[in-house]
Image (tube, rainbow, N blue to C red):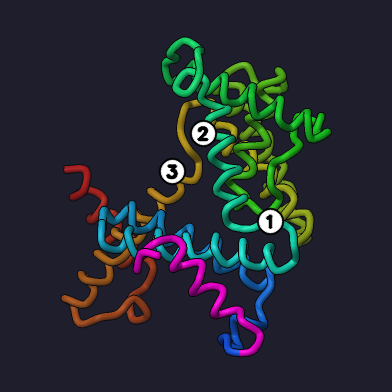
Amino acid sequence: MGEHSIEALLAVMARLRDPQSGCPWDIEQDFSTIAPYTVEEAYEVAEAIVNNDPAALRDELGDLLFQVVYHARLAEELGWFDFAAVAAGITDKMIRRHPHVFGAAAMRDAAVQTAAWEAQKQGERARRAMSGTLDGIATTLPALIRAKKLSGRAARVGFDWPDAGAVLDKLQEETEELRAELADADPARLEDELGDMMFVLVNLARKIGCDSEAALARANAKFERRFRAVERRLADQGKSPAMADLAAMEALWQAVKDEERG
């Protein structure tokens, strides 16, 4: 067994879960307690990619792989499947979904392959008795991503706005509905109307070819960059944000924006 092989990692996992000599914390875990760490590690992989940090990416991929090994070990202890079955399953699936690479099908461009991929996934869902258009979209996805998947599935069967202009009209309608609710300020109704508006925004992003998650991440980064610049300028004046009024901070904010735009 190689010192750094997958077999070694599987052996480490088995040792950690050993009821007699393992780690007390690891022994106590189950699927539900480990799942949040799995999601967290996936986000940390994404952050390493955004930061273009190869060393961090290597480490985070290792952490994410350990999560897969952890869940596979839990399943093996229950007699469901083991890590080898997980690896075999994804290997078979990738071969099945790429007949233009591993079979006799003609080579496809990216667009054709994407359409074929979706058709094949739809067939797989049908074989699992998942006949609904929206079946198989995980409820645990982040809300923006799930909204994109839900509306994208519906659009594939014709339930969609004709163009981005129609989505903007719907956004205006939802904006007015939210404005009307402001008078009563009922929290449940406000949340409901705000959710409708956000769902329409996700659809607008889809219609104009943008990714809503990426767009919001970019907006977050822009806000952080500009607000930090405002803080630095206030510090140069011997002030903190808490010591400045809104008008002063807004003026600095506008100055930062103007400088960015050149």
Circles 2 and 3, Cβ within 8 Å, touching? The answer is yes
Disc 3 marks which amino acid?
Ala
Q: Which residue is mark 3?
A: 215
Residue 150 vs residue 241: left or right? right
Disc 2 marks which amino acid?
Ala
1 vs 3, front mark: 1
Q: Which residue is mark 2?
A: 205
Q: Position of residue 139 (x, y in %)?
A: 71, 50
Q: Is residue 20 above or below residue 234?
A: below
Disc 2 secondary structure class? helix
Disc 3 secondary structure class? helix
Work out how far the residue at label 2 is from the one at label 1, CA to CA, in angstroms: 40 Å
**Which residue is at 40% across, 59% downward?**
61
Name which quarter of the figure residue 71 lies in.
bottom right
Range shown magenta: 1-20
Q: Earlier in the sequence, mark 2 or mark 3?
A: 2
Quadrant (top left, top right, bottom left, bottom right) of the C terminus: top left
